[in-house]
Image (cartoon, helix red, strand yellow):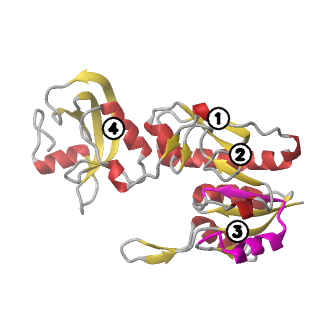
Amino acid sequence: MKKIIFMGTPSYATCILKALLEDKNFEILALFTQPDRAVGRKQILTPSDTKAFLCQNTPQIPIFTPNSLKDESIVNEICALKPDFIVVAAYGKILPKAILNLAPCINLHASLLPKYRGASPIQSAILNADKISGVCTMLMEEGLDTGAVLESIECDIKDKNASEVFDLLANLAAKLILSTLLNFEKITPKKQDESLATHCKKIKKEDGLIELNDAREIYQKYLAFTPWPTIFLENGLKFIELELVDETKQNTKIGEILELEKESFLLACKKGILRIKKLQESGKKALDGRTYLNGKRLKIGDSLY
C-alpha cells in the first residue's frame, strides 16, 4: 500500500482526494490545506473544501493548515510521516526544496503543460477559445509548473464555462492520479518544451469588466468568469446569462437593442451580436432580459446604457 500526503484546497482537489481514499492501494497519511478563511459579508470563518470533506467523512486523518511550508517544524512533520508520494492539487502554496526532496511530489495541473503554467489555466484556456484542454500529472520541482510531465488526458471544452470545465477536469484528474501512482515506476517523465511555455495570472474581480466591442471576446469572458468574477459593464450591470449570436457583423450603434424575444433580447456590439438572457443591477436581483428592459422602458433601437 502506497502512503500519500495530500496537499489541496478547492473542490477540484476534493474530487482527487476522494478517489485516493476510495482506492485500497493507497493510504492517506495527512491533508495539508489552506488555513480557514473569513468568507462573505458576515466574514464567517470557513474551512477549505478538502478540509470540510475530510472532517465530515474521515475525521481520523490529520489535517495541517500551515501559513508557510518553510518552517522547519513542518518539514520535520512531513518527514516523520514517511510518505511514498506527496500529491498536490491546487494547494495554493509553493513547495520548498526541503519538502520536494522528501518524496516524489506529483502535481495535478489543469492544463496540457507547458501551456498555461500558473494560477488560472482553466480560465485562460477558455479566454483563448481553446477547443481542447486537459489535465496532467507532473513531477514537481522548484520552478512554477516546470517539472517533467508523467501522464495527461485531453478533453473537449468548447462552449463550456469555467465551472463545468473545473468539474470535468477534476473527474479526469481523479482517474489520472490513480494511473500515475500505480504505474509510477514504468512511466518515463517527459521534459517540457520551454519554447512552447505560456503563463497565466491569478484572476481578479476587475478582470470581469467588459466593453461592448467584440461579441466573441465577451462570450469567452462570460464562459471563463462563470461563476466568478462574472462579467459586468462599467455601470455595474452584470450579464449573468448570454449566448453568442453573431461574431462578424459590424454595428455602428454599440449597445443598441436590436430585437426583443420572449425572455431575452439581442444586443449590438461593435463587432457581433449577443443574446442577453439574464442580467443583474448592483444590489438587485437577477432578471431575465425582457423583464429588465420592460422595467427600464427600453425598446428596439434604444441603447442599453
**As drawn, is 81 to the left or to the right of 192?**
right
What residue is rendered at 15% in x and 34% in y?
256
Q: Which residue is mark 3?
A: 31
Q: Which residue is mark 1?
A: 154
The answer to which of marks 2 and 1 sits earlier in the sequence is: 2
Q: Which residue is mark 2?
A: 137
Is 270 located above or below residue 82 in the figure? above
What residue is rendered at 12% in x and 34% in y?
300
State the SS at label 3: strand
In the image, what residue type sits under mark 1? Glu
Q: Residue furthest top?
A: 249
Q: Which residue is mark 4?
A: 218
Residue 80 is inside the magenta segment: yes
Measured as percent of width and height from the top left, residue 43 is found at: 41, 76
In the image, what residue type sits under mark 4? Ile
In the image, what residue type sits under mark 3? Leu
What residue is rendered at 70% in x and 68% in y?
31
- Judge the density around disc 1: few (<14), some (14-19), many (≥20) Cα neighbours within 10 Å: some
Separation (CA) of disc 4 from disc 2 = 32 Å
Measured as percent of width and height from the top left, residue 123 is found at: 48, 44
